[in-house]
């Protein structure tokens, strides 16, 4: 009888531990998805700001129509992305293109002095900072999640229930790691 109680107690403890581990994975996965959703919200702010920026710049950069059209195209690609990877790819391209507008503004003193442009530039700069913070937070949640998925005994539960490692948001190539050079 005592052996049966001991075995039953061990089974209950083990089952409780497995439930706690499983719930921990579910919690970490949801935090990870929330972090990615936070990035989406901030990217949406940026996407909404870009048309105002383009309208402000249009009058000053008449011969830069191709640059403006490229930004509109990249914004639309980002808005229509089907998954997080596509959205992040489009975001990187869009960020580079918007940076080109600010670089071009250096050649147009009237544009640089325009209060709407300065306000939009400041707002966009704040949004870029928010995006960077959100990406760092996302990567921190990916780190915690991946540690849980790979650590023993959690890896046994993770593999049993299909919890897979997630990828960090990273710069893809060396060109994106370099400081851009602006020449006129």
Image (cartoon, helix red, strand yellow):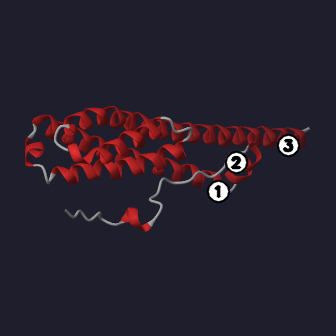
Check the image and name the residue furthest to the front.
Answer: 63
Residue at x-position 52% and y-position 39%: 81
Q: Is residue 155 visible?
A: yes
Secondary structure of the residue carrying tag 3 is helix
Would you call the spot at circle 2 few (<14 residues within 10 Å), some (14-19), or many (20 or more)?
A: many
Mark 2 or mark 3, earlier in chain: 3
Secondary structure of the residue carrying tag 2 is helix
Left or right of 181? Residue 18 is right
Q: Position of residue 143 (x, y in %)?
A: 52, 53
Instruction: Count the marks.
Output: 3
Label 2 with label 1: CB-CB less than 8 Å: yes
Residue at x-position 61% and y-position 41%: 24
Residue at x-position 46% and y-position 57%: 170
Quadrant (top left/top right/bottom left/bottom right) for the N terminus: top right
> Disc 2 versus disc 1: distance between alpha carbons?
8 Å
Q: Which one is in front, 184 or 116?
A: 184
> Disc 1 versus disc 3: distance between alpha carbons?
29 Å
Mark 2 or mark 1, earlier in chain: 1
Q: What residue is disc 3 on?
A: 7
Q: Position of residue 101 (x, y in %)?
A: 25, 48
Q: Which mark is residue 150?
A: 1
Left or right of 8? Residue 45 is left
Q: Position of residue 180 (x, y in %)?
A: 29, 63
Q: What residue is disc 2 on?
A: 158
Secondary structure of the residue carrying tag 1 is helix
> Disc 2 versus disc 3: distance between alpha carbons?
25 Å
Mark 1 or mark 3, earlier in chain: 3
Would you call the spot at circle 3 few (<14 residues within 10 Å), some (14-19), or many (20 or more)?
A: few
């Amino acid at each position: 009888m005592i052996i049966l109680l001991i075995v039953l107690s061990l089974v209950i403890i083990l089952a409780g531990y497995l439930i706690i581990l499983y719930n921990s994975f579910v919690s970490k996965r949801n935090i990870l998805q929330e972090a990615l959703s936070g990035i989406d919200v901030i990217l949406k702010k940026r996407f909404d700001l870009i048309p105002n920026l383009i309208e402000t710049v249009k009058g000053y950069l008449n011969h830069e129509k191709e640059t403006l059209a490229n930004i509109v195209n990249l914004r639309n690609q980002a808005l229509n992305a089907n998954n997080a990877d596509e959205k992040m790819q489009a975001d990187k391209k869009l960020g580079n293109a918007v940076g080109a507008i600010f670089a071009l503004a250096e050649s147009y003193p009237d544009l640089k002095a325009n209060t709407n442009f300065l306000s939009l530039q400041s707002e966009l700069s704040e949004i870029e900072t928010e995006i960077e913070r959100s990406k760092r937070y996302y990567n921190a949640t990916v780190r915690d999640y991946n540690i849980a998925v790979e650590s023993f005994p959690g890896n046994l539960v993770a593999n049993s229930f299909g919890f897979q490692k997630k990828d960090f948001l990273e710069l893809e190539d060396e060109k994106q790691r370099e400081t851009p050079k602006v020449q006129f």
